Image (cartoon, rainbow, N blue to C red):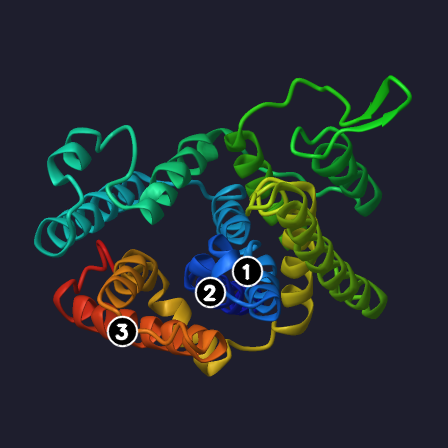
Amino acid sequence: MQSKINWIDNLRGIACLMVVMIHTTTWYITNAHSISPMNWDIANILNSASRVSVPLFFMISGFLFFGERSAQPRHFIRIALCLLFYSAVALLYITLFTSINAELSLRNLLQKPVFYHLWFFFAIIVIYLVSPLIKVKNVGGKMLLALMVVIGLLANPNTLSQKIGGFEWLPVNLYINGDTFYYVIYGLLGRAIGMMDTQKPRLTWLCAALFIGAVVVISRGTLHELRWRGNFADTWYLYCGPMVFICAVSLLTLVKNTLNARPLPVLGFISQHSLGIYGFHALVIHALRTNGVEFKSWPLLDIVWIFTATILVSLVLSVLLQKLDTRRFVS
């Protein structure tokens, strides 16, 4: 189990960095006509490669709670406290530093997050709620592959419609609806793959190739949508889309096979503070962008600056919070 915890720590650190990269590059992705095609394409590739971050968090939770142990009352208390604490921080930020309607945000607290990134706390509660009912069995590789192909690709409602004449052959309608279904599936796969013997060189290289290939498809598909629509569309960016699904499975297996010996210093440190970084990072990015502490005339420099500054500021806030929150209720 200790070696498995090592890859989980590294994977959590990677996922945390990817979340920050998504929100760092969002302005460029959604303002394609304000920057050069080359700079947009670089931001698009970085964002495409990072889309896997949210599925990875669900897979990590599934690995931890869809096995011998399940979420306990203390886990529910902690996630509720995190939601309340980071919502309060966001509400304070909105009230003091923005023109956003704080009263409306508070009134709709249980319907939508106070700040956009806090939606994850609502979604992860579902994984905790179903965990006492789920204990993933050891599954053979072929059976698991068949499950992933059918649910992740063939019957995925986010798969682009494919027709021959008037006959629609993709996606197959298995009455799968809603992102929550896939969040649970990600959790199940996290546990199933985590228990499997995946230490095979061919599989490692295959997963690396699949991840790179899926990122290329996501980025080129998004570019095609931009040219076709004349504006950005998140068709290929969806966390439950087929290409992101492939990225999630591939990267989890790749990290499990290659980063299993020990937590890497940087990733381990990021992993220890991933909750705080997640809770604070969106506010930091918003503050930097709205106050003009950016370099949009040099997009690549700006991406590096916003990403680095956000990580460092969020880390400092997380370290300070952990000194106060010694019981780790919200940090």
Q: Residue at x 44, y 73 (%)?
A: 303
How far apart, in angstroms, are the residues tagged by discs 2 and 1?
7 Å
Q: To which residue does mark 1 refer? A: 47
User: In the image shown, does 307 or 75 lie closer to the viewer?
Assistant: 307
The location of residue 197, given as percent across then percent down, is 74, 58
**At numbered mark 1, what does the secondary structure look like: helix, strand or loop?**
helix
Q: To which residue does mark 3 refer? A: 293
Is any part of residue 195 visible from this angle?
no
Q: Earlier in the sequence, mark 3 or mark 1?
A: 1
Q: Residues within 10 Å of mark 2 (few under 14, many from 20)?
A: many
Q: Residue at x 65, y 45 (%)?
A: 225
Residue 284, picture quadrant: bottom left
The location of residue 260, given as percent across then percent down, is 61, 71
**At numbered mark 2, what does the secondary structure look like: helix, strand or loop?**
helix
How far apart, in angstroms, are the residues tagged by discs 3 and 1?
21 Å
Left or right of 43: which side holds 203?
right
Left or right of 315: which side holds 71?
right
Q: Earlier in the sequence, mark 2 or mark 3?
A: 2
The location of residue 305, given as percent across then percent down, is 38, 78
Mark 3 is on which residue type?
A: Val
Name, please, the residue furthest toward the left. 96
Mark 1 is on which residue type?
A: Asn
Q: Residue at x 71, y 33 (%)?
A: 151
Q: Residues within 10 Å of mark 1 (few under 14, many from 20)?
A: many
Residue 251, picture quadrant: bottom right
Q: To which residue does mark 2 refer? A: 21
Q: Are marks 2 and 1 in contact (CB under 8 Å)?
A: yes
**At numbered mark 3, what does the secondary structure look like: helix, strand or loop?**
loop
Q: Which one is closest to the eye, mark 3 or mark 1?
A: 3
In the rendered view, would you say 100 is above or below 28? Answer: above
In the rendered view, would you say 250 is above or below 288? Answer: above
